[in-house]
Image: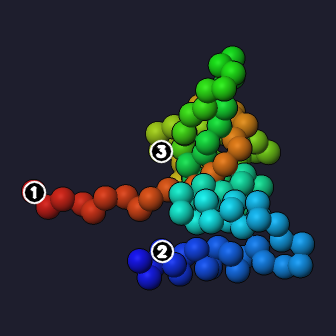
Amino acid sequence: MTDLRETILTAMDSVHDMDTTHGDYADAIIAALTGWQDISTAPKDGLPVLLWAECDGWPGKSSRVVGAFHSGAWRICGPVMGEPSGDGKERQWLGEVVPKKWSPLPPPPEASHD
């Protein structure tokens, strides 16, 4: 429970100033607990992240995709091949999206030694 308390306190400290509203605190706590943050805070250096984007043609429907900011737009990342990205890896870009939120990708699983 101490880790959760520290996470919440850190999130609250990150938005605290004289103009902070209860909504600001709530948004910061939600981001800290779920990992989702406003897209305006996402890295724009080509680093792949998890994106929460609305689906074109499907009002009210959203999807999670792995994407990166590349050539002035958010793009869905395909397999590691294609043109170079900001992190030095090559990617295939599958299309553009207009995300609302983002979250860092979790670390990959440890390699099995079977």
Q: Secondary structure at mark 1?
A: loop
Q: Quadrant of residue 18?
A: bottom right
- Identity of the residue drawn at 77% across and 65% down: 22
Q: Which residue is mark 3?
A: 80
In which quadrant of the rendered image does the N terminus lie? bottom left
Q: Residues within 10 Å of mark 2 (few under 14, many from 20)?
A: few
Q: Quadrant of residue 30?
A: bottom right
The x and y percentages for residue 14 are 72, 76
Q: Which mark is residue 114?
A: 1
- Identity of the residue drawn at 61% across and 42% down: 52
The answer to which of marks 1 and 2 sits earlier in the sequence is 2
Using the numbered discs, state the Cα–Cα distance from disc 3 to disc 2 in whole angstroms: 35 Å
Q: Is residue 44 left or right of residue 32?
A: right
In which quadrant of the rendered image does the C terminus lie? bottom left
Q: Residue furthest left?
A: 114
Q: Secondary structure at mark 3?
A: loop
Q: Which residue is mark 2?
A: 4
The x and y percentages for residue 89 are 53, 54
Using the numbered discs, state the Cα–Cα distance from disc 3 to disc 1 in whole angstroms: 25 Å
